[in-house]
Image (cartoon, helix red, strand yellow):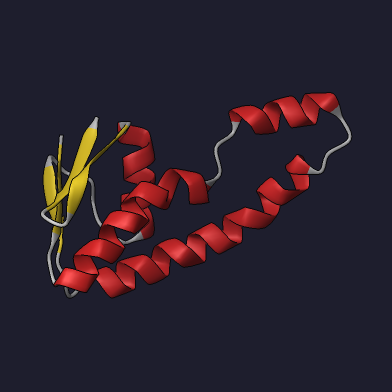
Amino acid sequence: MIRFSSPTSGDVQMLDAHARQLLDVIGKSAGERGVITAGEIPAALSALRSAIAQDAPQHARTEDADDPDERDHQAQDVSLGRRAFPLVDMLERAAKNGKDVTWGV
């Protein structure tokens, strides 16, 4: 588990694989500890929003699928937007207050 923290919100915990995916999107390596500084947050948010927008059409297609097997697969697959929401929210709150976001295992 990786825990994201900021003084502006509650902690967010994610499975390693999911957290690493989001950290990759924003250009950070997922070491034992790290920080997204207040100055880096706007670029991090932009990168996350761009990745979410690219991922959205794939999930929209499966939601409309007529094939029950396809809908079942989609029900098990969480979109990047849903997975990233807690981190995006934390980053937005931190940006408004000029605070960093840190993570650790």
- Circle count: 0
From the top left corner, tell me how far across and down residue 72 is, in percent: 72, 25
Q: What residue is shown at x 42% (from left), y 61% (from top)?
A: 48
Q: Left or right of 10: which side holds 18?
A: right
Task: Return the residue nearer the eye: 86 or 30.
Answer: 86
Q: Is residue 20 left or right of residue 80?
A: left
Where 23 falls versus 70 (above or below)? below
Point out residue 18 in the picture as x, y percentages from the top left corner: 38, 38
Q: Left of 30 or right of it: where is 69?
A: right
Task: Indicate the quadrant where residue 95 lies.
Answer: bottom left
* Residue 50 in the image, given as x and y percentages of width and height: 49, 67
From this view, report whether residue 9 is shown above or below residue 11.
Answer: below
Residue 53 visible, this angle:
yes
User: Residue drawn at (68%, 50%), measured in percent from left and top?
Assistant: 58
Q: Nearer the viewer, residue 5 or 52?
A: 5
Question: Which residue shows up at 15% across the image and 34% down it?
Answer: 105
**Residue sitting at x 32%, y 66%:** 44
Placement of 48 over or under 13, stated as above or below: below
User: Where, quadrant-wise, is the N terminus in this rendering?
Assistant: top left
